[in-house]
Image (cartoon, helix red, strand yellow):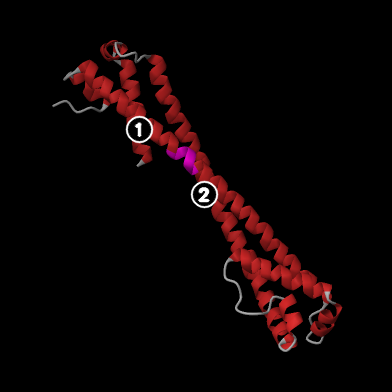
Amino acid sequence: MLDQKLGVSEVAIENCRRSAPIMAGIALYKYDETRLQQGEGVITRIKTLTLQWNSAQSQKMQATLELQTAAREFKAVYYKTRRIAYLLFKNQEPQRRALALGGRQKRTLIQWLEEARQFYTNALADPEARQQFSRFGVTMKSLNEEKALLVKVEKAMAYQEKKAAEAMEITRLRKLAIKELDQFMSELFTILRLAMGKSQLLEAVGIVVK
């Protein structure tokens, strides 16, 4: 666990500092207060990054939920209007191509949104298509309202991608900081063993003396 790793590191560094014999011993290897503070600086950075990581994960989760909600809201109306379009233009290939009605619907979110954008852009731009839609109660106003829901999904997706990227970057930085702390503590414990041998003082910094 990270909390345990940080706690062990903090205790080891602080107990080094409190022991004059240990400080004198590791000083021979150029370990002094400045070097110990470097280790503490890494610990502080990890704690800060962990707070940021928790916040970033929460924001990513919230953004994902908002995207899912917006997508469900849009799909509910889009699929109905799309079914009407199939009925209206089942024998009119140019309109089917213009409204992206050919073949199976695309499965990835980006492809699906591109398909939907083509559908509404061309439906709104074609007077004949609008007239045909009106036969089933689909007006220009309702098409624009549905397109607005599409825009809402696109914005939600962009925001979710932004939050996911931020979370990924913070995760990367935290992993690097943890790796840096592991290396610092490994080197410190090696120097402590070299400097203090079998001294029982090492027990205070977490090194078991046999």
89 sits to left or right of 76: right
Residue 50 in view here? no
Residue 24 locus on image (x, y percent): 29, 10
Q: Which mark is residue 57?
A: 2
User: Which residue corresponds to the image point at 33% horizontal and 27% vertical from the top-left?
Assistant: 11
Q: Residue at x 25, y 23 (%)?
A: 204
Badge 2 amino acid: Gln
Q: Quarter-wise, where is residue 188 in the image?
A: top left
Does the segment drawn in magenta span residue 173? yes
Q: Which mark, by number, is residue 194?
A: none
Q: Nearer the viewer, residue 197 or 89?
A: 89
| Numbered disc 1: secondary structure | helix
Q: Which x, y percent locates residue 40? A: 42, 25
Quarter the C terminus occupies: top left
Q: Amino acid at mark 1?
A: Asp
**Can residue 139 be seen here?**
yes
Q: Is residue 197 left or right of residue 71?
A: left
Give the extent of the magenta segment. Answer: 171-175
Residue 121 sits in which quadrant? Answer: bottom right
Mark in the foreground, 1 or 2: 1
Asked whether 117 falls inside the magenta stretch, the response is no
Which SS does the magenta portion mostly show?
helix
Residue at screen point 79% across, 82% down: 133
Query: How far apart, in angstroms, are the residues tagged by discs 1 and 2?
Result: 24 Å
Q: Earlier in the sequence, mark 1 or mark 2?
A: 2
Q: Residue at (61%, 75%) from the top-left corner?
A: 105
Q: Residue most toward the right?
A: 127
Q: Position of residue 171 (x, y in %)?
A: 48, 43
* Residue holding disc 1: 182
> Do the CB atoms of the residues marked 1 and 2 lie less than 8 Å apart?
no
**Tag 2, which secondary structure?**
helix
